[in-house]
Image: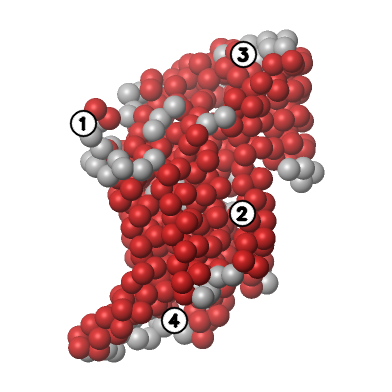
Amino acid sequence: MLWQQLNQTVELGWDFYAPVILFVTLIIMAVPVWAAIGAAAILMLTMSGDMPLSAVGESLFTGIDAFALTAVPLFILTGDVLVRTGLSRKFLDVAEALTQFAKGGFGSATVLVCGMFAAISGSDAAGAAAVGRMTIARLVESGYPRPYACALVAAGACTGILIPPSIAYIIIGLVLGISASTLFLAAVIPGLAILVSILATNVVVNRIYSYESGGNVSMGEYFANLGKALKSGWYAFIVPGIIFYGIFSGQLTPTEAGALAVVVTIFMGFILGTLSLADFPPMLLSSAKVNGVILPIIAFSAPMAEALAIMGVPQGFVLAVTSVSEDPMVIILMMIFILIAAGCVMETTPNIVILAPILKPLADNIGMNEIQFCVMMITALGVGFITPPLGLNLFVVSGITGESILKIAWRAVPFVFFMLIVVLLIAYVPALSTTLLPDIYK
């Protein structure tokens, strides 16, 4: 029914359907997403004649000609350096010391260290790989079934794009013209809410199945172990401290904070003797590969977004949805469904650059705060990292362990359920994403 309304509103023709069919076909054939988007955009512009192809080159350049995007490779590189220097293991030691009192403590420590890593790298896949290599074997030794241990890491790593600084918030800020620093501030409470939901889910599951024993430490032992862990690894928290203080105090832009974090992390690696000049080529190559996936998608999505805007698709989508229902509660549910469905079949970056300009007018139409909309969108898309068929984090931990993706996905169901509850709270309770913002943004 919604599709029929959209057809009637915009009068879509083959200049829309042919590019969509081409895009879907190329994705099914495992063609890189940026190439599929680029081919569909060029076909759409050729068939519609709305914009001369000579302008595509300029559109590609302007799509990535943004100072804010410089932060993306910097945060990715910081995460790589963090792993190479062994500082990420210091996070695990502190997280384990913090949770030693609880039954299921190491499982909770795994989730916490995912959140700590997220507060530096801004990437979920990097977090899943780094934390997975450190913790999955120990989780299995502690009594967790391997598929569940993989699901726990995959779910915890979802915080990579939900806890600031997040690459996803930088991208959606660029697409919609919103300050990344403002979005980072808005994402603090929702990101922590997702982290708490994953922690709570693990505690409940562990209580039911008794996967991991523990929690038999006295208060004296607890504080002694915590003090030892902090004394041994306190310096690792200098990096997230620089990022958070620099951005949230307004002293540094996200790009400047990312650059300073890279320099400090490298310096610490040399001081500790865990980093050498020989480590730089593989680190830079690894970061370049990740960045080389993100930036072309953003670049080729720019002409696609322009073509859709010229054809009136975003405006038509608003009219089509509101013709089905004008109830904001229903419209928000429809947006969440679209975002989760999209997150299940496509990566976050193309989803942001394609869907944000289409759904944003709909959010404006029902009076939703634009900051709240951005946080809701990123959080809903984040659920897609542990849902088939794409579920990027599922593939990452499966690649590390050789465990079946379907087995991991089945064990991830409880995490998906509680994360969806948080998504609904973000969507219907604006205060979750606006409490920390200045009054001008509320």
Circle 2 is placed at which residue position? 287
User: Which mark sits nearer the N-terminus, 4 or 2?
Assistant: 4
**Which amino acid type corresponds to the residue marked 3 in the rendered image?**
Met
**Which amino acid type corresponds to the residue marked 4 in the rendered image?**
Tyr
Query: Secondary structure beneath disc 4?
Result: loop
Circle 4 is placed at which residue position? 211
Q: Position of residue 46 (x, y in %)?
A: 76, 16
Location of the C terminus by quadrant is top left
Q: Which mark is residue 311?
A: 3
- 59 or 373: nearer the viewer: 59
Q: CA–CA distance between discs 4 and 2?
A: 36 Å
Q: Residue at x 42, y 74 (%)?
A: 90
Circle 1 is placed at which residue position? 439
User: Which mark sits nearer the N-terminus, 3 or 4?
Assistant: 4
Of circles 2 and 3, the one toward us is: 2
User: Which mark sits nearer the N-terminus, 1 or 2?
Assistant: 2
| Image position of 347 with respect to 356: above or below | below
| Image position of 381 with respect to 141: above or below | above
**Which amino acid type corresponds to the residue marked 1 in the rendered image?**
Asp
- 147 or 169: nearer the viewer: 169
**Which amino acid type corresponds to the residue marked 2 in the rendered image?**
Ser
